[in-house]
């Protein structure tokens, strides 16, 4: 488990890397995006991955940090939006409510306000690097960034149900309903805003079945691939001063 809470680590990362120094090099450190089937263990894998990557961190580089649910707060902070609106940034928000809140705030349609603001935040975090961004269409937002590495986690349905039961202390029926609604919300979010299929493997560098590969081993595989690509890049250098991991 992480020593600091997820939100506190994210907050510290933001505070340390929010300067507007134009001399700063961006895309110099890797970014990992994780998409997952609900219950495939992205929470466990991400925390283990942060530990492993932290052990390989280069001096003076950003601390590896996870942005998942705390990404919502980052969006609110970035765009000076009231904190009571955080629930409207959830992927499960109905389109009617999203549009209403969006147009009230900015006079712009939802596709501009909510998704655009979130995408801006994701892009900024990814360019700073040493971040793991879970969901919110992060792999599509960062598709053209050379330092971004995209992962998709899947698992057997029964294993997913058990994981959700354990994490949220739910009974089987509640867990199944949770999975159905969460999967559908994320699938609809991606299709509506990016016009892509979230489960299409062509959008990921690696798809891992966590029912066949345990969480810890999954994290080690991802860590090893990212680390090897970083070393490969470093050995060849770059005329642009950015890390071309891919």
Image: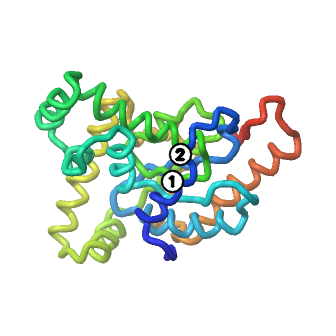
For residue 184, say whether it is visible: no
Q: Are marks 2 and 1 in contact (CB under 8 Å)?
A: yes
Q: Secondary structure at mark 1?
A: helix
Q: Quadrant of residue 53?
A: bottom right
Q: Which residue is mark 1?
A: 15
- How many residues crowd mark 2 within 10 Å: few (<14), some (14–19), many (20+)? few
- Please give the name of the residue rendered at 50% of the width and 63% of the height, measured from the top-left corner: 46
Identify whether 163 is placed above or below 118. Answer: below
For residue 204, say whether it is visible: yes
Where is residue 157? Give x, y as percent: 33, 62
Where is residue 125? Give x, y as percent: 52, 44
Q: Secondary structure at mark 2?
A: loop
Identify whether 225 is placed above or below 51. Answer: above
Between 206 and 229, which is closer to the camera in this rendering? 229
- Please give the name of the residue rendered at 21% of the width and 60% of the height, measured from the top-left corner: 178
Q: Which residue is mark 2?
A: 18
| Left or right, residue 121 beside residue 19 | left
């Amino acid at each position: 488990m992480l020593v600091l809470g997820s939100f506190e680590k994210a907050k510290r990362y933001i505070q340390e890397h929010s300067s507007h120094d134009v001399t700063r090099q961006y895309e110099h450190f890797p970014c990992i995006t994780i998409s997952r089937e609900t219950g495939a263990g992205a929470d466990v894998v991400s925390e283990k991955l942060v530990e492993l990557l932290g052990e390989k961190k280069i001096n003076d580089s950003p601390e590896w940090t996870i942005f998942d649910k705390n990404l919502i707060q980052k969006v609110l902070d970035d765009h000076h939006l009231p904190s009571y609106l955080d629930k409207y940034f959830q992927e499960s928000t109905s389109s009617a409510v999203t549009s209403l809140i969006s147009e009230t705030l900015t006079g712009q349609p939802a596709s501009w306000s909510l998704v655009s603001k979130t995408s801006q935040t994701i892009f900024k975090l990814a360019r700073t690097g040493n971040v793991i961004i879970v969901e919110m269409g992060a792999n599509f937002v960062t598709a053209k960034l050379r330092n971004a590495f995209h992962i998709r986690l899947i698992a057997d349905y029964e294993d997913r149900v058990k994981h959700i039961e354990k994490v949220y202390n739910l009974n089987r029926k509640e867990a199944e309903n949770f999975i159905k609604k969460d999967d559908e919300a994320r699938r609809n979010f991606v299709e509506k805003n990016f016009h892509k299929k979230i489960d299409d493997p062509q959008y990921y560098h690696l798809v891992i079945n966590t029912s066949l590969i345990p969480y810890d081993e999954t994290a080690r595989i991802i860590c090893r691939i990212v680390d090897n690509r970083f070393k490969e890049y470093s050995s060849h250098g770059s005329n642009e001063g950015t890390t071309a991991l891919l």
